[in-house]
Image: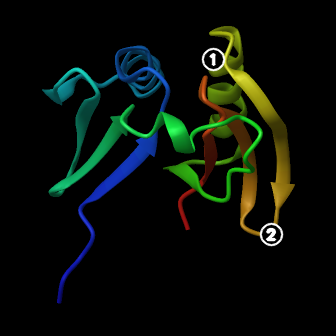
């Protein structure tokens, strides 16, 4: 069976986005070109930022997908990460709240792409 192995996030500036994601997730790129930068997520999976699609990138277009960081532990860990990221000045879309799957919050990258933090299922 074929399994997806890369998630690509459209951004306006690949280098700036790579700095944002690298800082947020404490990771370094494994591949860099002027408009495409990839990070290894482990298990053969990569996250890439790509600035080759500016004509399709606008903050006015609703974002219909999210990157999700699933954390082990309880609500305290999620609240602590929220405080850490908010302290970095990350754009907060939804402050921590309780959802059917547990404690969660949502932030956005500089291009408006959504990042959710939630508990491990």
Which x, y percent locates residue 37?
A: 25, 30
CA–CA distance in space, label 1 to label 2: 24 Å
Q: Viewed as shown, does residue 97 lie left or right of 25?
A: right
Residue lying at 43% horizontally and 14% vertically, measured from the top left: 16
Image quarter where the C terminus lies is: bottom right
The residue shown at (19%, 82%) is: 2
Callout 1: few (<14), some (14-19), or many (20+) C-alpha neighbours within 10 Å? few
- Would residue 18 appear left or right of 91 to someone viewing this image? left
Give the mark count: 2
The structure residue drawn at horizontal position 72% and vertical position 33%, both measured from the top left corner, is 79
The disc at residue 100 is 2
Asked which quadrant contains residue 38, the reply is top left
- Left or right: residue 66 compared with residue 75: left
Residue 54 image point, x, y percent: 49, 34
Label located before the other in sequence (1 or 2): 1
Local SS, label 1:
helix
**Most foreground residue, 60 or 43:** 60
Which residue is at the front of the view, 97 or 31? 31
Residue at 17 percent across and 90 percent down: it is 1
- Residue 53 location (% of width, % of height): 43, 40
Q: Is residue 6 visible?
A: yes
Looking at the picture, the colour scheme in use is: rainbow
Give the structural element (helix, strand or loop) at label 2: loop
Q: Is residue 101 above or below residue 79?
A: below
Q: Examine the image and state in which quarter residue 3 appears.
A: bottom left
User: Which mark is on residue 84?
Assistant: 1
Q: Is residue 34 above or below residue 88?
A: below
């Amino acid at each position: 069976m074929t399994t997806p192995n890369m998630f690509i996030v459209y951004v306006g500036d690949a280098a700036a986005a790579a700095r944002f994601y690298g800082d947020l997730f404490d990771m370094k790129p494994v591949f860099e070109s002027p408009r495409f930068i990839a990070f290894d997520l482990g298990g053969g999976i990569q996250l890439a930022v790509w600035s080759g699609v500016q004509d399709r990138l606008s903050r006015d277009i609703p974002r219909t997908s999210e990157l999700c960081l699933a954390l082990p532990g309880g609500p305290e860990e999620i609240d602590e990460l929220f405080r850490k990221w908010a302290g970095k000045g990350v754009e907060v879309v939804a402050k921590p709240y309780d959802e059917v799957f547990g404690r969660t919050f949502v932030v956005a990258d500089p291009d408006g792409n959504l990042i959710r933090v939630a508990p491990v299922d």
